[in-house]
Structure formats: structure tokens, C-alpha cells
Amino acid sequence: MKLVIAEKPSMARAIKDVVGREYEVTNAFGHILELAEPDDYLSDSVPLNPKTGRKIWRDRDLPIIPVNWKQIPKREAKDQLRKIGDLLKKADLVVNAGDPDREGQLLIDEILEHFGYRGRVERVWLSALDPVSIEKAFRNLRDNRSFKPLSDAAMGRSRADWLVGMNFTRASTLSAGTFYSIGRVQTPTLALVVRRDRTIENFVPRDYFDVLAHVRHEKGAFAARWKPASTDGPGFDEEGRIKDRRLAEAIAARATGPGKISRFDKKEQKQQAPLPYNLSALQKAASARYGLSAEEVLETCQSLYEKKITTYPRTDCRYLPEEQLGDAARILKGLGISPTLRAQVDPGRKHAAWNTAKVTAHHAIIPTGESATGLSDREQKLYDMIRTSYIALFLPEYRFYAVSLALELGGETWTASGRQEIASGWKALYEQGSDEEEPEDAPPLPDCRVGDPVAGQGGEVISRQTRPPGRFTDGTLVEAMSNIHKFVEDPEAKKRLKETSGIGTEATRAAILETLVARGYIVRKGKQILSTEKGRSLVGFLEATLPDLVDPVTTARWEDSLSEVAEGSRSMDDFVGGIAGLVRSHTAILLTKGRGQLVAGKKTSDRSQFVCPLCGGETFLVRWESRKKKGFFFWICPNKDASGTPIHPPLSDENGKPGKPFGEVRSSGPKTANPHSRTGTGKGQSKTRAWSSRSKRGSR
């Protein structure tokens, strides 16, 4: 039996429709195996939380560095995993039909490894799910072993994220006494938002002035901007802008009387249509145009892909393989082009986007030519954007004259530039201002000749203010992650980062944003993304103690290393071993320097060196002042269970030292006498209930 294992049910159905007579087809549900939880690596002596049944979080157990990594089936996928296992027993050949990327490679490979399958395995690389693409891909199967480096890179990424997330999150939470999470990509992304917000809030606007001359030429009127001979004087700022209103008004007063054209340039230029979208470019455009989040764009593109009407969405590439240009006529035929434009569409036109040398693992997102009916509103909007960007590739270039001039008037030099359209070409596809990637057209200028007379009709002073950068949106933050070099000052690092794909991947950036929202680090207000007090607290602390965790250069270097693993030039174990070493050193710092410093929105004194009498060992208490009763203090133990719930009640304060707990002590296993516990009925019981209620919301 020849067995195809697809990544998901929709892909399995599409494959079965085409090759179902030759192959048995089954599917996973994305990753149906996952890395085991920290509890699987911790000693059985670690106390359990009786409520959750999970082991408590303790300083002494960190860092957790697995020697033999374990993978376990996801609970909801056990039945499907069993079915795949039964089919593998009968299979002579298996085709890995995961998505065409690292994760897609791994999620099928790990199933085969889980069952110890040792038969022949081939790989089908599906960038689109229409019948033509599937048929072509199955004619070009490759040995699955040649893709092992991709699988290793995905597993290396998974283990690195586990090491960083599990250890740093526990260490920072134990130190702070409130839940914090730290991630390999999420934390430097958060730092981008925090630093942008700081810049905006600390920005002091400065006034400056533009001076325009209103000029009439025999062929039309236009405005020209004053060009100073020098900007070194006291009336200018460091950017060469006029900051002195009196100087600006004096110059404007000279913009009258006769003048003449001193320079006139007119050159014909051509402009090709924009490159087709990759995921981040589509997320940016859809965020600006429709206010969609990065996650909404990704989910919608995945739906369009699974409906077979667009190609694979998680791509970082904006180019197309030249070998596919022959499919253009078929695809264009199914795109419903208006009769007025159809006559101009040339399927043989070779736009610069057709460049096999620039295609990475996946090409740009394009339509497949399949019928696009019954789409939701969001699907229709994104499909139209993808469809339009593809059609534009086959329309004539936008042609125009670029015009610039200079004139002498009132003893000053003034300049202007603009465009004169010759043929709209592909721009006829777009409504005015609908494509965020295209700059606004410059105003038209009349044809002039050097020496032509002009008449100055007065000057105008326009008051302006310097502006801070804009708040991040989903689209601009995803773009910042993919172009992280723009936020780095070190020249060498900047140069190297410009050649990489930034931080995160096209497949993960949307999820990172959603994680930051879920953690309470950022919030959305309309289209804008803003950092919260909690997010700023974390970034501020890390900048002072572990700056590499908020430095995008660090994460980009990790991505470089993962690329080396994917290319086969570096081993997965070498990469993960390096991350493990960093985790050991940084966890120790988080557990020490984090004490008393990593707290958001709550007032505490310096963290003491009093050991928790209920936990003992390396766990130190924190002294807090009550928010309701000034001058009233209490002590808390930072240890929490896996759900983030404190495992002990607070302790009273006795002359600046920890006293007895305010209620019962929760424990697991055999009960032992605790001299600090308070049990019984009446008043003590009331305090226990009150603490239990508060504990559900986390520590104070």
C-alpha cells in the first residue's frame, strides 16, 4: 500500500481528489505530537498542587534542561494518531505531504519516528492545492531523507523555544511574585513596541516653517519651495529646516515680481507593477486598508489556500519561478478581468517578479485560477488584493514624465518637481489611493524652457511641527519584525540582519502578536498597538540586567543558526546545546536580580533574604504594603503552581520580619505538622476562605 499523510484534513481531501486511485490518503491535524511538559523531567519528590495535580514551581528546580527529550501525543489527537499507526503497518511507501516548510516537514517526520517506521518515504512539495499543482507535484516526488535538515531545524526551534520559555518564564515569575512570560521572539518584539511608545511619549515637538512661492507661467500656475543657499545659520535646525518665523516671513515677502526659469528637466520614466505579496506585505497592506490583525490575515489566507484558490500563504518571498510563467494564461482566464483591461493583459509579459534565482522555499502568494465563489467578506477582500496584484504583473507599465525645475525670484532660488502621466498602464487596476505601497503622485507642472519668464504672486509661510513616529499597528509591527535591521544601530549587525528574514518567521509572527496580547503586555486600540505597564516593566528590567533578551540581534542570530541547520551545515544538537548554555546563566540572573525589581504596578520594599518557612531552600519571601491599608505589610512566597496560583497563603509581618501565615497551607502527600499553619474553625477559617478566593486571581 502507498500511503500519503497530509498535514490537515482539507489538504488530504484535495490530494485524494487527484491521486486517490493510486494512494491511500490520511491526515494529521497539524502537530499531533508535542514536547513533554517540565513535570515529565522533574523529580517525583517535587510537591504537587492538589488542585491541578501538577508540580509546583520552585527556584531550586531551575533550570530544567532535558537530556533525553520526550514527545507525547496531544490528547485531542490520540484517536487519529492510532489510525495513522494502523495504516503505517500496511504501508510499503509513505509520502510526506506536510506543508512546504520546516514545520510541515517535522510534523509528518515526527509521526513516522513515533511509530518507528523504517520503510521508504518520499516527499511531495505542494505550494498550491489546485488539481494542476497537485498532479505536477506528485510527478516530482523526492526522497524524504533529503529534507531531514528542515525537520531538524523545526525541532531545534521547538526545543530552543521550550528551554527559553519554560525556564525564563518560571524564573521571572518566581522572582516577581506575579506571572511573567519571556520568549525567544516575543520579548524582543515587545521591546520594539515599548521603545516606540517611549519615543512617542518623550517626544517634544519643535516648530519649523516651509516657505512657498506661488508662481504663474504662461502655461499654468504652480507652487515652488524655497531652496536656501546654506543652512548653517542660526535660523536653521540640525535638519536644515527653518526654525525662525521672522526669517521665513522675510523670505516669503520676496516671492513677488518678475522671475525666470533657471533649470528645467523632463524625463520619461516607466514603473512596473508592485511585486506580488508575501505574507508580511499582505498583512501590512490589509492592516492599513481594512484594519485586520496579522492573525486574521493569516487565518484568512490559510482558508483561501485550503479552498484551493490561492497558493501557500506562509511565505517570505515576493518572487515567482520562471518555470510557472507558462501557467499564467490558464490562471488569468479564471480571474474575471474586466473587458476594458483584458485587451491589455499579456500572459507572456515577463515582469521582474519572475525570477527563479530569488525564490526561496515558497514563492509569492498568487491565485491558482480556480473558481472563487461563496467567500466570506474577509476572504473576498484578501482574495481581491491577491488577484489584483497578480493581474497587474501582465499589464503595461505605468509611464510618465518626471519633471523638475528651478527658478530665480526675488533674489532667491525656488524648486518644484512633479509628474505628467503618459499612460496609466497597470495603475488602471487600482482605485486612487487604494494601494498603500504606491506613493501619491506629485502635482503636475507645466512644460517650461530655461529662461522662460514667470511672475511671483506672493509667498506663503506654512507652519509645521516635527512629529514622532507613529504607533505600531499589526501591519507595521509585522513589517518591523521582518525588517529588524532598521532598528539596529551597530553597522556590522545592521548589515548582516539586512540579509536575513528578521525575527520570527512568516508563519509565527501573527501568533507572537496574539501571545503578547494574551500575556497582557500589549493592547490594541483601534488599529494601534500600545504597550502596557506590565510590558514596560519587563522590558525595563531586562534592558538593565539581560539586554540580550530584548536585543533583536540575538534572536536574529538564532534564526541564522536555524537556517544553517535547515541547510545541513550545522547540527541541531549544536544549536540547542548553545541555547541550553545561555539558559543556565540567564536563569540564575533572573532568580537573583529579578527579586524586588521585576514588578508591574505594585509597590514593594526591597526583596529580603528571608527564606520561606513553608518551602525552605532557595525560595525567598517578598514584603508587600497593602493597597487598602497604608502602613500594613505582609509577606508572600513567590512559588506558584503551573496555573500561576500561589501555593501558600501570605504571611503576617512582625516588626519587619515574616510571621505566621493567614490561613491553611496547601500541601501534597503525607501531612506533616507545620508550626506556622493556622487551621480550625471560626476566624481562622474565614481568613482561609478569603485567601483561597484571592489566590484564584494570582498573587497580590
Image (cartoon, rainbow, N blue to C red):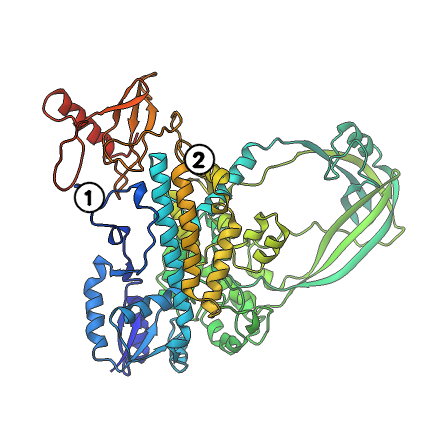
Rendered image quadrant of residue 497 = bottom right
Rendered image quadrant of residue 380 = bottom left
Q: Toward the viewer: 5 or 632?
A: 632
SS for tag 1? Answer: loop
Res. 285 visible in picture: no
- Expressed as whole percent of the image width and height from the top left, the position of residue 673 reads 13, 32
Q: Is residue 339 left or right of residue 246?
A: left
Q: Is residue 680 left or right of residue 345?
A: left
Above or below: residue 160 compared with residue 620 = below
Q: Residue furthest left?
A: 681
For residue 119, the mark is none
* Tag 1: amino acid: Leu
Above or below: residue 489 compared with residue 363 = above
Q: Residues within 10 Å of mark 1 (few under 14, many from 20)?
A: many
Residue carrying label 1:
48
Q: Toward the viewer: 238 or 418?
A: 238
Residue carrying label 2:
537
- Expressed as whole percent of the image width and height from the top left, the position of residue 336 reads 46, 67
Q: Is residue 591 left or right of residue 450?
A: left
- Expressed as whole percent of the image width and height from the top left, the position of residue 127 reads 42, 70
* Tag 2: amino acid: Ser
Q: Toward the viewer: 139 or 572?
A: 572
Q: Residues within 10 Å of mark 2 (few under 14, many from 20)?
A: some
- Expressed as whole percent of the image width and height from the top left, the position of residue 41 reads 27, 53
The earlier-in-sequence mark between 2 and 1 is 1
SS for tag 2? Answer: helix
Q: Is residue 542 left or right of residue 39?
A: right
Q: Nearer the viewer, mark 2 or mark 1?
A: 1
Res. 237 visible in picture: yes
Kindly indicate whether the residue at mark 1 contacts the one at mark 2 (C-beta within 8 angstroms): no
